[in-house]
Image (cartoon, grey):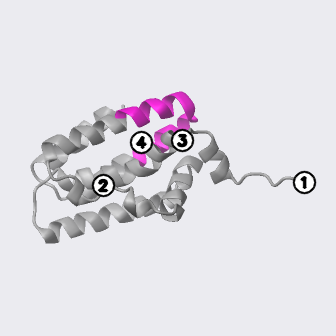
């Protein structure tokens, strides 16, 4: 008798591989963009990074099967270190932030079309939470990034 896929596997199978990659890489991209939205010193970047990682991990306790599946994938996919952007990849804030916001718009449209409304809402709220925690103490462009992110996510 064939085994039934787990709920995480079933959630992943609901999306094409490139769509799943977008959904699993976007939390880190949002975290990096939020960190990059505000210039600051190394100490501030470390604190923001820790806040972002904590917010990503907190998604593991979400009521949403989609968010939990994405968190699980983030922490279990092999060879992710080569694929996930780092702060060094966002050296030009003016160029990097629009790309992340465009990816957010794509993900929001994908979720509206293919996910349960509650999962779509939970995922986009989770991204907002990640950015909010990173930008929590931001002055200047951080709050503007949160506004732009909210607009991109719909």
Within the magenta stretch, is there residue 22?
Answer: no
Callout 2–callout 1 Cβ contact below 8 Å: no
- Which SS class for mark 1? loop
Disc 4 and disc 1: Cα gap in Å?
38 Å
Q: Which residue is mark 3?
A: 119
Looking at the image, residue 110 lies above or below residue 6: above
> Mark 4 against mark 1, which lies toward the viewer?
1
Q: Which residue is mark 2?
A: 31
Q: Which residue is mark 4?
A: 124
Q: Earlier in the sequence, mark 4 or mark 3?
A: 3
Residue 60 versus residue 71: which sits nearer the camera?
A: 71
Q: Earlier in the sequence, mark 3 or mark 1?
A: 1
Q: Position of residue 131 (x, y in %)?
A: 29, 51
Callout 3–callout 1 Cβ contact below 8 Å: no
Q: Which residue is mark 1?
A: 1
Residue that lies at the very extreme toward the right in this rendered image: 1
**Where's the N terminus, which quadrant?**
bottom right
Q: Which secondary structure type mostly characterizes the magenta part of the structure?
A: helix
Disc 3 and disc 1: Cα gap in Å?
31 Å
Q: Earlier in the sequence, mark 2 or mark 1?
A: 1
């Amino acid at each position: 008798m064939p085994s039934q896929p787990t709920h995480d596997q079933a959630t992943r199978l609901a999306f094409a591989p490139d769509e799943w990659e977008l959904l699993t890489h976007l939390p880190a991209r949002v975290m990096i963009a939020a960190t990059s939205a505000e210039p600051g010193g190394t100490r501030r970047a470390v604190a923001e990074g820790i806040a972002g990682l904590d917010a990503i991990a907190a998604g593991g306790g979400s009521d949403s099967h989609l968010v939990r599946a994405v968190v699980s994938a983030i922490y279990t996919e092999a060879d992710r270190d080569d694929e996930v952007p780092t702060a060094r990849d966002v050296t030009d804030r003016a160029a990097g932030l629009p790309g992340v916001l465009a990816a957010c718009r794509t993900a929001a449209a994908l979720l509206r079309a293919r996910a349960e409304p509650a999962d779509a809402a939970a995922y986009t709220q989770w991204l907002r939470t990640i950015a909010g925690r990173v930008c929590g103490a931001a002055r200047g462009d951080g709050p503007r990034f949160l506004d732009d992110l909210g607009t991109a996510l719909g």
